[in-house]
């Protein structure tokens, strides 16, 4: 590892999970990074929003922690970085994935895509990170620009641009879509999303994540008004319809 050049960036890690089974192939050690600029109405981790807080960690130390679980990483397992929004700490991510790749560890980045821009200095850093990332998990929260802004506080042009950029560069990705009744269940929107996903050449999997209310207590605790009060999880029929439109067979 001596020949791995690192920036020495310190990552602020909100929490970790030793046996993540959903965020990438196999079992994975997951780093949930502190900080996110979006304000998705259904976010179940509002405690990750603040850019303050978290536990400081350097890449080597983080990989050392993850490696304790290496024996469970058969079937394509490895590490995943999630959030919050991990791309807000891109210098740390580059260091982390550099160390990981030097040890042959599979790397996955779970992102909302919100920080993505083709402007410098971000773009060059992103290109470096992209070369170190085996799989991207990209949330597309709403295909409709206006509804996306209403749902998250931001528009989605750069997020869709990120998806196209990953596709153009041959990077494998999973697309995720949280299904919220009345907000992301419109069949016209889902059809547009399906059409957009068809333009991408490297999508290995599309997933529908049913909205749930597990985060509501956290809002109360933090004194933040919960915008989706009264919204219930989607019905089996709504989930089945969304999967059908998005061409998800299982
Ligand atoms: S992008 Fe993720 S962490 Fe950020 S507000 Fe949305 S759901 Fe929450």
Image (cartoon, rainbow, N blue to C red):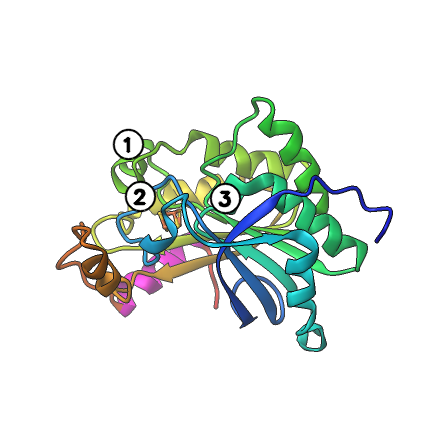
Helix, strand or loop under label 2: loop
Residue 237's place in the image compared with 147, above or below, is below
12 inside magenta stretch: no
Query: What label does residue 39 carry, if any?
Result: 2
Identify the residue at horizontal 70%, vertical 72% (top origin).
70
Identify the residue at horizontal 57%, vertical 25% (top origin).
118
> Which residue is tagged 3?
197
> Which residue is tagged 1?
146
Position of residue 238 measured from the top left corner of the image (x, y, whole percent): 28, 61
Per the picture, the main secondary structure of the magenta-coloured stretch is: helix
Q: Residues within 10 Å of mark 2 (few under 14, many from 20)?
A: some
Helix, strand or loop under label 1: helix
C-alpha distance separating marks 2 and 3: 24 Å
Report if residue 77 is visible in the image: no
Q: Is residue 102 left or right of residue 135?
A: right
Q: Is residue 93 left or right of residue 154?
A: right
Nearest-to-viewer mark from 2 and 1:
2
Does the numbered disc 2 mark a residue whose Cβ is under 8 Å from ligand 1? Answer: yes
Earlier-in-chain disc, 2 versus 1: 2
Q: Residues within 10 Å of mark 1 (few under 14, many from 20)?
A: few
First to last magenta residue range: 236-246
């Amino acid at each position: 590892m001596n020949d791995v050049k690192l920036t020495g960036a310190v990552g602020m890690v909100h929490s970790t999970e030793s046996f993540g089974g959903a965020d990438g192939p196999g079992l994975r050690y997951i780093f949930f990074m502190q900080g996110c600029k979006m304000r998705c109405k259904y976010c179940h981790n509002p405690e990750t929003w603040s850019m303050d807080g978290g536990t400081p960690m350097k890449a080597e130390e983080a990989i050392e922690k993850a490696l304790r679980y290496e024996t469970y990483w058969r079937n394509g397992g490895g590490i995943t970085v999630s959030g919050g929004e991990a791309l807000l700490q891109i210098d740390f991510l580059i260091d982390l994935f550099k160390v990981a790749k030097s040890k042959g560890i599979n790397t996955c980045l779970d992102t909302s895509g919100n920080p993505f821009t083709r402007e410098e200095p971000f773009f060059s850093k992103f290109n470096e990170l992209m070369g170190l990332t085996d799989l991207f998990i990209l949330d597309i929260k709403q295909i409709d620009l206006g509804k996306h802004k209403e749902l998250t506080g931001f528009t989605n042009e750069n997020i869709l641009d990120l998806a196209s950029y990953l596709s153009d560069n041959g990077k494998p990705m999973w697309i995720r879509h949280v299904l919220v009744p009345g907000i992301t269940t419109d069949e016209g929107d889902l059809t547009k999303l399906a059409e957009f996903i068809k333009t991408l050449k490297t999508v290995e999997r599309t997933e529908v994540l049913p909205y749930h209310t597990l985060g509501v207590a956290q809002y109360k605790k933090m004194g933040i008004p919960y915008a989706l009060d009264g919204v219930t999880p989607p019905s089996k029929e709504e989930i089945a319809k969304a999967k059908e439109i998005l061409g998800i067979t299982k």
